[in-house]
Image: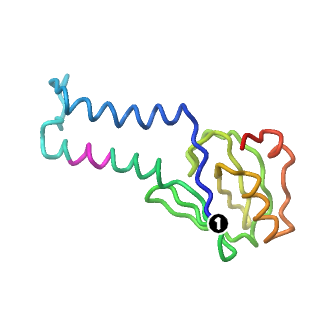
Amino acid sequence: MYFPSKKDIWLAFIIWGVILSIILVYIFGGEPIGWQIITYKSVLGYIMSLLIIGLLLWLWFGTGYKVEEGFIKIRYGPFRNTVKIEEVKKLSATKNPLAAPALSIDRIEILHGKYNMAIVSPKNKTDFIRILVTENPDIQVDKNLFNHQND
């Protein structure tokens, strides 16, 4: 089953703001300020702008979690990670702002293996947790996960 990432409005403003800013520079122009090595009018500038826009769109539309065949397959744009459900020890609520494959600050910390951790933010936390616990009943579920429920 596929679970798209929950998306916070503040992150939408950042990602779409950067994309819009880049597009507006090309529409309305304007000379760069200072001693830039790469200007927006150069071939390298076009390539870098397209790569930045492409990466941001890929992250926005390509972040999600697929639970299948005993694994959680985490996708964050071009980045991939896999967690064996049988190795998951604990699910905890976290608001950890560190970089993670999550588009929301309302996150689930997955402790797995000996010292491994993955942070996700599925839009439907209840079903995500239910499926994991169904496949591995030994998973400890932090009660705070349900206190911050906004599905």
Q: Quadrant of the C terminus?
A: top right
Residue 66 location, quadrant: bottom right
Q: Is residue 18 above or below residue 86?
A: above
Q: Image point 40% across, 46% down: which residue?
A: 56
Element assignment for label 1: loop
Q: Image point 59% across, 50% down: which residue?
A: 5
Q: Is residue 37 above or below residue 90?
A: above
Q: Is residue 126 left or right of residue 41?
A: right
Q: Is residue 42 left or right of residue 78?
A: left
| Depth order, front residue of 67/96 | 67
Which x, y percent locates residue 76?
51, 55
Q: Image point 68% across, 61% down: which residue?
A: 116
Which x, y percent locates residue 1?
64, 66
Q: Image point 64% across, 52% down: which residue?
A: 120
Residue extent of the magenta highlight:
47-52
Q: Main secondary structure of the magenta part?
A: helix
Q: Name, please, the residue furthest toward the bottom.
A: 69
| Depth order, front residue of 131/43 | 131
Which x, y percent locates residue 65?
60, 60
* Mark 1 crowd level (few <14, some 14–19, many ≥20, 10 Å Cα): few
Q: What residue type is disc 1 on?
A: Met
* 151 in the magenta segment: no
Q: Is residue 136 left or right of residue 5?
A: right
Residue hosting label 1: 1
